[in-house]
Amino acid sequence: MTAIRTPRLLLRRWRPEDLPAYAALNADPEVRRWWSAGVLTRRQSDAQAAKLQAHIEAHGFGFWAVEAPGVAPFVGFVGLQYVDAHLPVGPAVEAGWRLARSFWGLGYATEAAGAAVEYGFDRLGFREILAYAVAGNLPSRRVMERIGMRHDPDADFHHPDRPDDDPKRRHVVYRLVRNRPV
Ligand SMILES: CC(C)(COP(=O)(O)OP(=O)(O)OC[C@H]1O[C@@H](n2cnc3c(N)ncnc32)[C@H](O)[C@@H]1OP(=O)(O)O)[C@@H](O)C(=O)NCCC(=O)NCCS
């Protein structure tokens, strides 16, 4: 895949020039509020971007860098990846998103995620794509709902890396099943 285009966005492979903007996004406590690790250093952020790009190279899909042509060369990432094996929802393909705060409230995440799941069904042949989030992460849950995912309460789980008393331990799972014949 070279890139996925939507009316306003381009989902593409990562470039070295994305790294400072990705590090700035990961240094924002508001963006990172759902992760127990909190904000990331530049080094951690760069390592994470390398891992995301490695998934794209290995599998032909992943959490792509998102560009808004004419607006900004990098606004965050959106895409599909294999669920981490230590989580109780896999094996599965998940949709995920993380945008810099200045690009929230514009519908970018929904626009990119809708295109990514369509690509997953039409081009990659997946039959189901899920997404999960900390139960309290309502903006992320709204993206799931806007792209047509449905909450599957039976699949909700407690994150294995979080202590019992952590209010961000409970995760909700949403699913989208391909509705067209293969
Ligand atoms: C999750 C996240 C990507 C959602 O971003 P978002 O901007 O709220 O989501 P969208 O891009 O779909 O935009 C939807 C908002 O834009 C508004 N909007 C404006 N123009 C729009 C358009 N053309 N189309 C759709 N929505 C539009 C919608 O009304 C909606 O606003 P509302 O939530 O106040 O009702 C963002 O909050 C984020 O990066 N959070 C930190 C990282 C994170 O939590 N990632 C997910 C971990 S599971």
Image: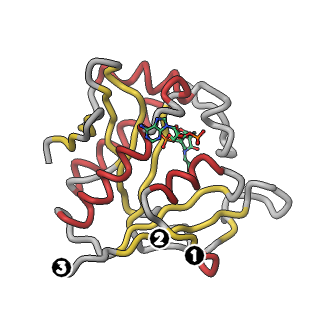
Is 113 on the left or on the right of 102, as rendered? left
Label annotation for residue 175: 2
Please tell me how crowded label 2 is: few (under 14), some (14-19), or many (20+) other residues with Cα within 10 Å: many
Secondary element at tag 1: loop
Circles 2 and 3: CB distance less than 8 Å?
no
Q: Quick one: label 1 or label 2, which is nearer the N terminus? A: 1
Instruction: Mark yes or no: residue 14 visible.
Output: yes
Q: Is residue 99 above or below residue 36?
A: above
* Along the line of sight, the residue nearer the viewer: 133 or 141: 141
For the residues marked 1 and 2, what is the alpha-carbon distance in whole angstroms? 7 Å
Please tell me how crowded label 1 is: few (under 14), some (14-19), or many (20+) other residues with Cα within 10 Å: few
* Along the line of sight, the residue nearer the viewer: 72 or 163: 72
Q: Is mark 3 within 8 Å of ligand 1?
A: no
Instruction: Return the x and y of residue 133 as percentages of the image width and height.
Output: 60, 57
Secondary element at tag 3: loop
Circles 1 and 2: CB distance less than 8 Å?
yes
User: What residue is shown at x 35% (from left), y 44% (from top)?
Assistant: 112
Instruction: Return the x and y of residue 182 as percentages of the image width and height.
Output: 18, 79
User: What residue is shown at x 32% (from left), y 42% (from top)?
Assistant: 64
Q: Which residue is under mark 1?
A: 152
Q: Amino acid at mark 2?
A: Arg
* Along the line of sight, the residue nearer the viewer: 154 or 5: 5
* Along the line of sight, the residue nearer the viewer: 46 or 71: 71
Label annotation for residue 182: 3
Instruction: Return the x and y of residue 95 as percentages of the image width and height.
Output: 42, 57
Q: Amino acid at mark 1?
A: Asp
Instruction: Return the x and y of residue 12 as percentages of the image width and height.
Output: 24, 38
Q: Quadrant of residue 36?
A: top right
